Image (tube, rainbow, N blue to C red):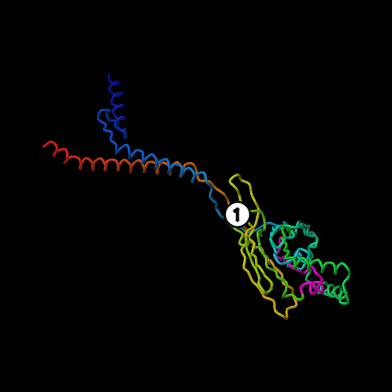
Amino acid sequence: MLAREVKMGLKQAIKSLDAFPRAEEHLLQKTQTGALVSVVGLVIMATLFLHELRYYLTTYTVHQMSVDLRRGETLPIHINMTFPSLPCDVLSVDAIDMSGKHEVDLDTNMWKLRLHRDGHIIGTEYVSDLVEKEHAAHNHDHEEEKDNLHIHGFDQAAKDLVKKVKQAIAEGQGCRVYGVLDVQRVAGNFHISVHGLNIFVAQTIFEGSKHVNVSHMIHDLSFGPKYPGIHNPLDDTVRILHDTSGTFKYYIKIVPTEYKYISKDVLPTNQFSVTEYFSPMNDFDRSWPAVYFLYDLSPITVTIKEERRSFLHFITRLCAVLGGTFAVTGMLDRWMYRFLEAVTKPKRRSAMH
């Protein structure tokens, strides 16, 4: 008997802890305003649930910095540019190591597309005239001696080239240069110009450096594969010259970057910042117009890591959002019921009288 009383008392104590007491069915009053508030509340809850679910499923990135320890790797340079006023026969790509060393293992995969004045492609060729130069005095002297051989006349190949290029210029041909340069991971520069031509051939074709129009459009310039959210500042850059010429110089600061996906895959690449300088040609310049890209590497590596929010964080936000919506709609229902009751009571009393 005593055990039974203890058991009943325990049940009553547990029931007293119930935070959600149930009312009898006949004591509940359902109203149209309550139904309207309930529907609005359900729509809001469903919308907020989908928003929280999408927020949980999307990843966010964390940036970290450390000293760059990579050694012995190459630097890929992805180039995609258009020169609307220069034929492909006069354009060359020069890659120079700023240390002055000759790059004998420079791996090139460059192509040139001949363009009609309207922009459509009329021919394709592999760039075999990549010039690897060393800024040394003996090389400069050697070039001068080579040029002196052509003072008294051109050979037949040079004459054919001059005729071909002049015809292309008259037709308004342009050139699109694209591909990948793999260079050593040290400071250096690459430039696109008419430097591959013999100086006397260039003088015969253009009749002076001021007539070399290096107007260009940079469709894509990057130093590695692209990752989500990357911004290459030179993409879609357009520089058009009218009745003038000069040299464009882009000073690029490359920041080594690692992008770590949520799947743990690592993508090594590079991002960069750039400043631009234009030097117009004058009558006394002995140099020829060109487009230079001078790059240097930062000693700091940026690691970008994808992360996802924890499931407990998602459940916490979901409970807060849904519980808050339920509480607000409950308050709104009570306020509307009391308001309508206050409005309708005087009318009932007047009708009874």
The answer to whether residue 24 is above or below residue 136 is above
Queried whether the magenta region covers residue 141, the answer comes back as: no
Viewed as shown, does residue 36 lie left or right of 58?
left
Above-or-below relation of 196 to 53: below
Q: How many marks?
A: 1
Q: Residue furthest bottom?
A: 284
Magenta span includes 200:
yes
Depth order, front residue of 320/326? 326
- Quadrant placement of the C terminus: top left
**What is the crowding at mark 1: few (fewer than 14 residues within 10 Å), some, or many (at least 20)?**
many
Q: Which quarter of the image is occupied by the N terminus?
A: top left
Residue at the limit of the structure toward the left, as seen here: 353
Quadrant hosting residue 10: top left
Q: Tell me which amino acid carries mark 1.
A: Thr
Q: Is residue 154 left or right of residue 63?
A: right
| 244 and 168: which is toward the camera | 168
**Left or right side of 2 for 237:** right
**Mark 1 falls on what kind of element?**
strand
Left-right relation of 123 to 67: right
Residue 108: x percent and y percent? 77, 58
Residue 132 placement (x, y as % from top left): 79, 65
Give the x, y percent position of residue 135. Answer: 78, 71
Q: What residue sits right under mark 1 in the picture?
A: 303
What residue is rendered at 70% in x and 79% in y?
Answer: 282
In which quadrant of the rendered view does residue 136 lie?
Answer: bottom right
Q: Nearer the viewer, residue 155 or 35?
A: 155
Decide which of 107, 290 is in the foreground and name it: 290
- Residue closest to the far top: 1
Q: Which residues are magenta?
A: 185-206
Residue 180 at what x, y percent from top left? 72, 57
